[in-house]
Image: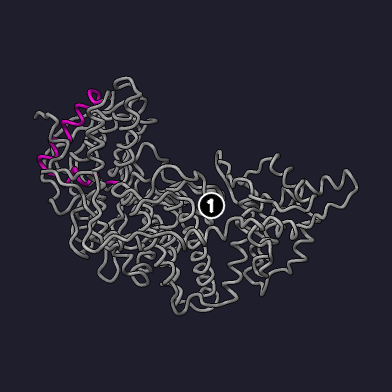
Amino acid sequence: MIEPHVIPDAVFDSLAGGEGGPQAVSLLRRARRSRNLLLLRHALDGPCGPAVQEAAELLARVERADPAAVEAVVDGPSFGTWVSRTAHDCPSHRRGEGCTARDLAAFAAVAAVRAGVAAEISVPVHAGLLRLPGLGTATRTEAAEQALVVTASGPGTSAGAPACGGQSEPGADVPRAKRRGGAAARPERLVEIRVPGRALRLPRDPSRTSRDWQPVALLEAEHAGLTLSLPLETADPRLPALDTGRAGPAAWQGLLRQAWELLVESHPRRARELAAGLNGIVPLPAPARGVTSATSRNAFGTVLASWPGEPERLALTLLHEFQHSKLSALMDLVRLHEPGGRPRLYAPWRPDPRPPGGLLQGIYAHLGDLAFWRDSGGARRGPEQADAAWRFERTRAQAERGLAEAWEHVRLTSPGERFLERAAETVGSAGSPGVGGDEGLSRAVARVEAGGEAAWRIRWAVTDAADVRRLAGLRRAARPPGRLPPDEVGSAAGAVEGPGPEFGRWAATQRGAVRARPVREAADAVVARPDRVECWAELAASAAEEGSAGAEALRHRTELVRDLFLELTGERRTSGRDAGCDPLDLAAWLAAEPPGADRLRTSREARDVRRDGPGQNTGVSMSQNARSPLANTSATG
């Protein structure tokens, strides 16, 4: 009987609160493995199935000989992304011509190498390189379109010790890498790669470098009995090669050891989750400034990151990105929101509008960041402690605003409401001795957040010219504005950066400021330079701190206040009449119809939050695999 994956109430609540523990991570990993296998079956049954029959047969044969070797491949950093793309792209391809499904041969070859199964299989060559994800890259394959990978038979890895990136089912808190034996899990193998005119024999230990072979490095770190073992995945044909000139495997290894010590010492519960769930790091090219990191929703436990440069940054990146992995896997199992509602939402940690799912992802990642700064801040002193406190307060403020946005604009399901309730409990109880708690710091953070939202609205919120002219007429006639125009947000196209250096400089000054600029002075600055975003941001921050009548409008409908101000001041310049164009007065006049923040609070308080009773499980529609889909594939040999 095929049974569904089920998340018990206690596990769901723990995950929703930001954690979950190793057992919850194990559940999510098993569910993701089932998803990957079901997508593989879909791809094999699709129009490109005949083109990859050879690879499917080999993978089925390896699974019969050593199921753990296939699990290691299916759970690895590259497989989930590949199979998701293949399952969606295959229907649009002609059979076998340029199809991404052909890369299944590379995964089958890697599984055969790990299991010590004798095999011969043709693997596509990409840009002159034969890439075997999780194993390594063969160079100098010339102009060949494919290469023949030949493996010899031999003793495979034990079921409890798959090679790098593989995972056995964990016990309660047993570190995964300890069970699989770390580097010792890489046995010696006889592997040959043949292209027209030459043959390349890999080192007996495929983790060693040779003239024509660049292995995937295995990074290992151990502290206080907890071990982390991660491949530095550089053999995925869809990814750029590692920039070894700036940071090669040795540099990553040293940084990971320091980051892991920090995590185990300061964040032991989170470290146990990472040990149970992380399965690889994909190095990204360095951006022009700073560090970039990401998570593919289809690659559970894989962190994509440019060179972080310092242990604390790597530790935070691992924790932050793994939160995304957990939520992506959870959302495969439990529907947290329905389609519809507002499509583009405000997320204070991003410069661009976010869809509902993206907003929930950001909130959840911030729960991890909040724990990081809370747990590490108490042990700091001087400037480092002050920096942790600032980051903690900003993270908490952004999480609270994100939660308010989700309650107001996301069409939550009953589990989704429960999810946000638990997340809100985590944010509300995040205070800890030694971190935060300073009223001046909280006020400074509030100014930056108010100004940041005003700047975001000027950039993204859309006003209709006819609505602005109508409001200008009502203002001239000294009549109330009535119901405000719809609150609409435009869409982003291409890469989006922050609000600009001028706003950044203004925000930086707030951290050391005792109070906001007097609101009258801020309003006069807007009158003098209404084109400057930072002037409007500062006015919104000052009005919020002083509790001005138009504070809500200046923060939550900034674009409307600005466009109405420009409409009236433009008329004054052409007619010579005084239209009473003071931005504070205009905001207070518009606030006669509460423009956003009040509605956020009242909708949240009025919501009838449904709580599931004790003893209920969160059932899901995706089935566990009683048998692997590969079992339906005929195999010979």
Colouring rule applied to residues: one colour
- Count up the numbered dots: 1
Q: Name the residue: 11% across, 30% down.
A: 635
The quarter holding residue 223 reads bottom left
Q: Main secondary structure of the magenta part?
A: helix
Element at label 1: loop
CA neighbours of label 1 inside 10 A, class few (<14), some (14 to 19), many (20+): many
Q: Position of residue 605 (x, y in %)?
A: 47, 63
Q: Is residue 523 above or below residue 568?
A: below
* Magenta span contains residue 64: yes
The quarter holding residue 598 reads bottom right
Q: Which quarter shows the N terminus?
A: top left
Q: Name the residue: 22% across, 36% down.
A: 109
Camera-nearest residue between 360 and 261: 360
* Magenta span contains residue 135: no
Regarding residue 295, the answer to whether it shows in the image is: yes
Give amino acid for label 1. Tyr
Q: Which quarter shows the C terminus?
A: top left
Q: Position of residue 155 (x, y in %)?
A: 10, 45
| Magenta segment | 49-76
Camera-nearest residue between 272 and 554: 554
In this image, 237 relative to 9: left or right? Answer: right
In this image, 396 relative to 53: left or right? Answer: right
The quarter holding residue 629 reads top left
Q: Which residue is mark 1?
A: 346
Camera-nearest residue between 189 and 167: 167
Q: Position of residue 40 (x, y in %)?
A: 24, 35
Q: Position of residue 446 (x, y in %)?
A: 59, 67
Regarding residue 217, the answer to whether it shows in the image is: no
